[in-house]
Image (cartoon, rainbow, N blue to C red):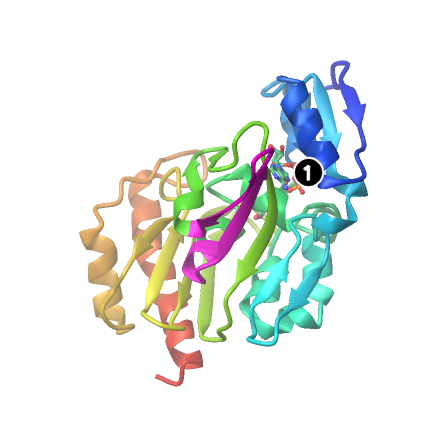
Amino acid sequence: MLLREVGYARPRTTDEALGLLAEHEGARPLAGGQTLINVMKARAAAPDILVDLNGIGALKGIELGSDGTLELGPMTTTSELIASQEARARPILAEVCSQIADVQVRNRGTVGGNICSSDPTNHLPPLMVAIGAQMTVTGASGGRTVPADEFFLGVYMTAVGPDELLTKIMIPPGRSDGFSSVAVGRDGTCIVNAAASASGELRVVLGCVSAVPEVIRPSTPDPETVRSAVEAAHLDPPGDVHASSEYRRALAEVVAVRAATQAAERAGG
Ligand SMILES: Cc1cc2nc3c(=O)[nH]c(=O)nc-3n(C[C@H](O)[C@H](O)[C@H](O)COP(=O)(O)OP(=O)(O)OC[C@H]3O[C@@H](n4cnc5c(N)ncnc54)[C@H](O)[C@@H]3O)c2cc1C
């Protein structure tokens, strides 16, 4: 289906973009367009003006701080992250980004767009929560920091307000992480996924089982303990054409165990 008519602006600075978003009620940020353009074609979203963030250099790039903290610009594409030397400081990032869809989607789709979509089947929301990412959300009155576990509010809903932008993603140092998913076909949408981190207290975060990533805190990475912790969460996942609710709940235990085991092995435990 063709797009309906829409205005377009390509600001050069974050302030200019924020000004456009504040000025026009129907304005919406455009990153890689891999989700937004598709939902516009399906008439599920109808912004009046697209505020294209691709011309804003300050929103791109990856920096590694002397303490090992990674600072990701939200307009970094997933392909750029995979190729980045700096991003190797937290290897799970590139490992998971390489599993997203295909090279065409990864070349256009951005880290920030993946997160801001808050699509429960996306790879990055549970990963960001598991590794304790901190998001900087900026509006006219300045920036605020939102921990990843408070960022995702619902399907397609995040802590970013209509006239705000996600402007930075801070990733703490750590290498003891894991990820596991079951997808529809080789490059397909996740039916269920799990990210885990044993850098600090063990944390397993499940995706695709509810509107937002579900945090599970097993006391140890022992498979039985992880399985019991998932069971105790009383998940009520949606059923769809790919998987019934029961099947998704069963798979959640499987991927949680795999992700926790991988994280624990990398922690040397
Ligand atoms: C065929 C196909 C298969 C895919 N499969 C997968 C998959 O298996 N796993 C997966 O994780 N992803 C998948 N994706 C999603 C893809 O990886 C992109 O991450 C996602 O589409 C959004 O990124 P984008 O940069 O294209 O954002 P856009 O589509 O441009 O934007 C998405 C949303 O985020 C908002 N937004 C973007 N940047 C900001 C910002 N800085 N501040 C505030 N709001 C912002 C936009 O307004 C919009 O609402 C797939 C996409 C396609 C087309």
16 drawn magenta: no
**Mark 1 neighbour density, 10 Å: few (under 14) some (14–19) many (20 or more):** some
Q: Where is residue 107 in the image (x, y as percent from the top left)?
A: 75, 51
Residue at position x 72%, y 26% from top?
50
Asked whether 135 falls inside the magenta stretch, the response is yes
Q: Nearer the viewer, residue 171 or 256?
A: 171
- The picture places residue 8, in percent across and down from the top left corner, at 79, 24
Quarter of the picture containing the N terminus is top right
Q: Quadrant of residue 237?
A: top left
Q: Nearer the viewer, residue 246 or 122?
A: 122
- Quarter of the picture containing the C terminus is bottom left
Mark 1: secondary structure: loop
165 sits left or right of 198 in the view:
right
Magenta segment range?
127-148
Q: In this view, does 91 lie to the left or right of 55?
A: left
Q: In which quarter of the image is ligand 1?
A: top right
Q: Mark 1 points at which residue?
A: 34
- The image quarter containing residue 256 is bottom left
Looking at the image, can residue 208 be seen? no
Residue type at the position of mark 1: Gln
Residue at image location 67% in from the left, 20% down from the top:
23
